[in-house]
Image (cartoon, grey):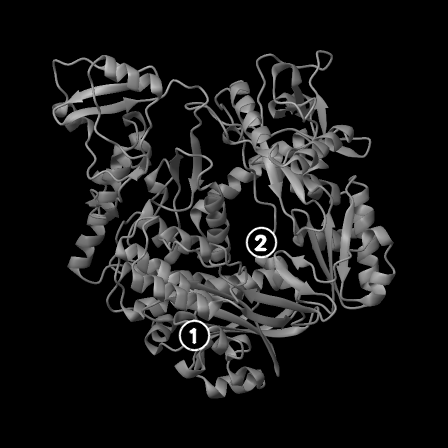
Amino acid sequence: MSFRDCFGSGTEITHIRRKVVPLTKEDSEALLSQNMQLPSMSLAKVQPSILLGCDQAWQFLRQNSSQVELPSGLHVLRTTMGDILAGKLKSPEKILHLSLKDEREEITQWDNYWSLESQIHMVHEEDNPGGDEEDECRWEKFWELESAGIHEFGNPEREEKDRHDKQVWDNFNLTVERRADVYYVKLPWKDDHPQLPDNYAIAIRRLHSVWNSLQKDQNLLQRYDAVSQEQIQMNILEDVTEERPSSKTKKHYLAHQALVTPNKLTTKLRIVFDASAHYKGCPSLNEVLHRGPVILPQLFGILLRFRIGRIGIIANVEKAFLQVRLHESERDFTRCLWLWDYRQPPEPNNIRCLRFTRVAFGLTASPFLLAATTHYHLDTYSSERDLVQVIKNNLYVDNVLLTAENYDEARYKYIKCKEMFNALSINLREFVSNDEKLMQGMIDKDRSADPQPKVLGIRWNSLSDRFQVNCSISTDSHVSKRTVARAVASIYDPLGWLIPLTHKAKRFLQSLWKEGYGWDSTLSASHIQQWHNIIDGISGFEKAIPRVVARGSSNQVIATFADASLEAMAACLYLCDPPSTHLLMARERLPSLRTAMTMPKMELNAVTLATRLTETVVKELRSAIQIKYIYIFSDSEIVLSWVKNHHVAEKSVMVTNRLREIGKIVEHLQSLKYEGYFGYVDSIQNPADCATRGLRKNQFTTHFWWKGPAFLEEPESNWKKKSTTFKIKPESDNQERNVLLAAAGQSDVNEVDRYLITPKQAITLTQTKRILAYALRFIKAITRQVRSKHSNQVISASWWTSPR
């Protein structure tokens, strides 16, 4: 259904799907005893036809009929259309799962992925916590990787978040303690958070569930207990006894389950703790903790830097999350339950109460606390500032990636890294390098037995020093929108190398939304055939890609290409040191299902995408290489004229905002002393073209997508002769065309410009009226949300009476 708000903005609201609540045996008997019979219901998810507001719903209730409460806590409401169930279950163990998602409901949710716009947060209620949890986790990672590196430049929300994160950082620095060469930290609690309940019932129920599941495989159950016993022996977990201080009002339990990864050389079975489970109406532990600033460097940035330097080195941090001690005052918030004898069921006399002495994996704040402690420790090595910064920039959770130009440099980094982490009581292990001499010089327990490890998810053959890229999609006997979405999300492509190969799969998934398929509805025969054809064009693709693209501190040229079609907008970036050229990174966006857009505007979006991508890559690589020039190419002469003149006759707000953002990015790059050009490229030579249309695996392997057009192999001075290139003036040198004036956070409007609209800003009377209408509409909306006693802080009365 479509709605429009007071501003005239359209919003798509899709139907809600929920599972029908099954009646208990006691409920059914209670209904029979009162000669009541509910309509026949299926346990499948239902789709309501219409939503009734509170002002209308009561007209359907029988006024002279009383409610009937069932033993389960549900109520039967007598309506003019029949009896219906309402209310909530009495069971205290029913868990309400709330998760912040970077998508809106249904189509709106997916449109945010396809578009260039910022995404918003919503609250999602999941009736079945175990149902699609794995799919949701997979999608969260997929969205994060797909949008990494192309966020809006200078986003005010991000700046506000940075200020908030600084407070969390400051609190950490005040509370972290070093004792006998180990660090103790406190949890980053939110201010004025609701009190955590004693969720012992949840922990007991989940313990029964885990034991019942594991006891079907005695070997797995034994290994699960062995992991628990090892953690107890290592004092990662400790028994809760009367001798240890414990506040009776401050207890919270973490449920847990097994995570088996048979392909890993090291930890094959892990116990994962759930800090998000909670009673309905009560907070979980994760909800009352700050997530903390994201200290982890960008995953794609680490991979980019790993391609700079002749020698590559990777290492693994052993049990990273369990090396930071948890302060004694916080430990009762991380209690957990296990068994004294794992072979016996969870009876009261067999339940063992434990609590963490280290920061547990599963807390929303764990990544921050680990990274913050590591950074705090590394900063103590003031004489090794350069190496410390390199480690910080290339440490991702429990993975360290380093590069060097010669053996001596590589050997030094290996020794110093071991020394620094040993002082933190952390062991670096599983070292792998493409330098045979370096590997032979390591002690046996430090070396990995696998010469082809995964580097942040990408297979690296250290013997040939090449990445092994492949892509396969499994087929399901039942093809639905869910199985297609699951297949698309399973493709791991953090640098966008496979965009031309996977484009048709993403486009097909988008078409299923347009067709209105339900999540689990079987697709039509023609769509199933189309999907199988897409899989055939993807599965089995393999390609070896050189790891090294440049030597450290070498002079390089960046060339980024942008293109758009009716199917997508894309950008791809190359690192060039003629005649050597290499694809570094690419990104793609699909057009919105809700809003039709002209081709020039889509081409402008593609150039914006390319400009954002360029700024991101420059930021990630500026410490590793010298960048001489930056080129951004497009095959749209119309868009290039807009960019060059920074003026569009139609005065589209969207176009104006995009051009302004491009100008700001150019100004930022110029402030960093980078010389940038925009240029025209023929469509035939534009490598981004295939990313907007797609390629099959037999076409993709040898396509010039991997190297860029042939002219990149020529000296950079020839590029300007073969392509019309130009510089643009920075944003500050162009005339501003503001649509709205918002003095947010200022108590005195007189501190900003006196005039809302100046003669230079408005060209026609119609435009002046339109701008004023937007401004008044904004003022009306914002004052409606502010309490009357603060309304003078939004806009002073003198503003209306002052001369204009």
Where does the N terminus fall, quadrant-wise?
top left
Residue 738 makes an appearance in the image = no
Residue corresponding to mark 2: 298
Q: Nearer the viewer, residue 768 or 696?
A: 696
Identify which amino acid the numbered label 1 is placed on: Cys
* Quarter occupied by residue 298: bottom right
Indicate the secondary structure of the residue bearing disc 1.
Answer: helix
Circles 2 and 1 in contact, beta carbons < 8 Å: no
Please determine whether, in this image, residue 485 is positioned above or below residue 655.
above
- Name the residue rendered at 69%, 26% in the picture: 327
**Residue positioned 81% across, 63% down in the render:** 409
User: In the figure, is residue 751 to the left or right of 261?
Assistant: left
Check disc 2 and report its element: helix, strand or loop. Answer: loop
The quadrant where residue 126 appears: top left
Q: To which residue does mark 1 refer?
A: 690
Circle 2 packing at 10 Å, graded few (<14), some (14-19), many (20+), is some
In the image, 95 versus 615, the foreground residue is 95
